[in-house]
Amino acid sequence: MSALAVELTEYVRACFSGIWIETLEPEEALAEIRQLCRERQWRLASWNLETGLRVAGESVAADAPDPLAAVRSAEGLAAPEGAGLLVLENFHRFLGSAEIVQALARQIELGKRQRTFVIILAPAATLPLELQKLFVTLEHPLPDRAQLEQIVRELATEGEVPADAALGRLLDAAAGLTRYEAEGAFSLSLVRHGALEPATVWNLKAQQLRQSKLLSLDRGTASFAELGGLEALKTFCQRALARRTRHQVSARGVLLLSPPGCGKSAWCQALGREVGRPTLRLDVGALLGSLVGETERNVRQALAIAEAMAPCILFVDEVDKALSGASGQGDSGVSARLFGTLLSWLSDRTSDVFVVATANDVTRLPPEFSRAERFDGVFFIDLPSRAAKEAIWQIHRTRYGVDPHDPLPDDDHWTGAEIAACCRLATLLELPLAAAANQVVPVALSAAESLAALRRWASGRCLAADAGGVYRSTTTPRRRRSVDPSAN
């Protein structure tokens, strides 16, 4: 029995006569409900605007396309024993009608006595105030690995089904897709390659995530070897994500604090490649909706996709900017509700989703965000050490074709991004590195006050991303010597 069927059975037995099922696949959800009714010998009718009212697969009334008549037909499902279920597909489109809302409210009250149940299938629960206390909301989960494997075996011939290891990679690629999307991705791979290739599934998944505008799939090509420094952070996450322990304890994630340009985003992109997990980038700004309840719905949808794709990495970049309005002032509490939903999920989740959140200004984050058990560690990424800078210079000299004998400029307070910019400008402007350095203004000097404040806050509160152990602030950036404008 499917997870939806188990949950629906419980609510029917408890006599919840109004049930809303959030689903992106109404036909699949209806098929599961139909199978449940056969097993339980419950009466079932279904309605949608195209086919009208159908009982046992047959149309029963000429006026069935009328949504009001569909609601009223639920009374005819009453039986001395068992239950009668009326499934209304995409019925959220008709809840702007006061007459339909009133008819639903009346039918749900009657259903308590008659054991008739109104079930609405729709992509999201958009209930008017009059019905919010009368409906319970269930989720139709995306297919699990067993269901995806069944689709593979139904589509492919025996010789086309991959061996165990390859099949596992294919199912990893398909995790988070609907049944329809997975079937299409597998079919496309068979047409293109004559075999089931994970790369085709990944490409289709990336397209589907872009359409949602909430998540994007980041399949970075860089590795840890191409990133200088951050050795303690690299080791910590590689060990945490290597495998679950015998007690089935999974890694939760890390919060990274640093000034801009210190490699937080590049490191997260490389992490996915290093540990063999897809990296999902969550756009917190896109979660904020203009309609009542839209933000909460977007958050739930994004987190449900991430959990369906587990094991994965969820990258939340510059979370301080997105959650700076969590006090709820000025936006009718939308930011506060988003923050509350995210906090609850960070604390309560059991799925193998490793969260990497980054922030540049910790003063804009509510203090409860970084407490223990929401993240495995809070790391401070300071300006790179001398050894890390040498590695970063070598990486970007090679990348931009800079003469390896060209002397290095004064880089005392540079970030990795500024070293990369200097090498790129040296190639672009055909200048020595020392001259190209005059075109770079280090953020450690242009924002010296905010960096000093961030270091003071992190000292004793965070782990050191490079050296390991508890971070202790010992340096204060000095002002860079003035440069004659003629040198530029």
Image (cartoon, grey):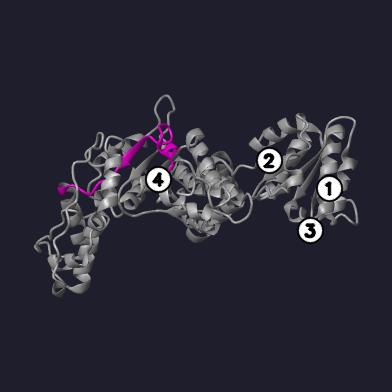
Give the label on residue 137, or none. Answer: 2
Write down the region rendered in magenta: 364-386
At 63% from the left and 55% from the top, the residue drawn is 291
- Please provide percent x and percent y for residue 49: 79, 57
Q: Earlier in the sequence, mark 2 or mark 3?
A: 3
Front residue of 191 and 464: 464
- The local secondary structure at tag 1 comes to helix
Look at label 3 and name its amino acid.
Glu
The residue labelled by disc 3 is 50
At 8% from the left and 62% from the top, the residue drawn is 405
Disc 3 from disc 1: Cα separation: 23 Å
Instruction: Reply above or below: 360 against 346.
Output: below
Residue 365 lies in the magenta stretch: yes
Q: Is residue 450 visible?
A: yes
- The local secondary structure at tag 4 comes to strand
Disc 2 from disc 3: Cα separation: 25 Å
- Please provide percent x and percent y for residue 32: 70, 41
The residue labelled by disc 1 is 102
- The local secondary structure at tag 3 comes to loop
The residue labelled by disc 4 is 357
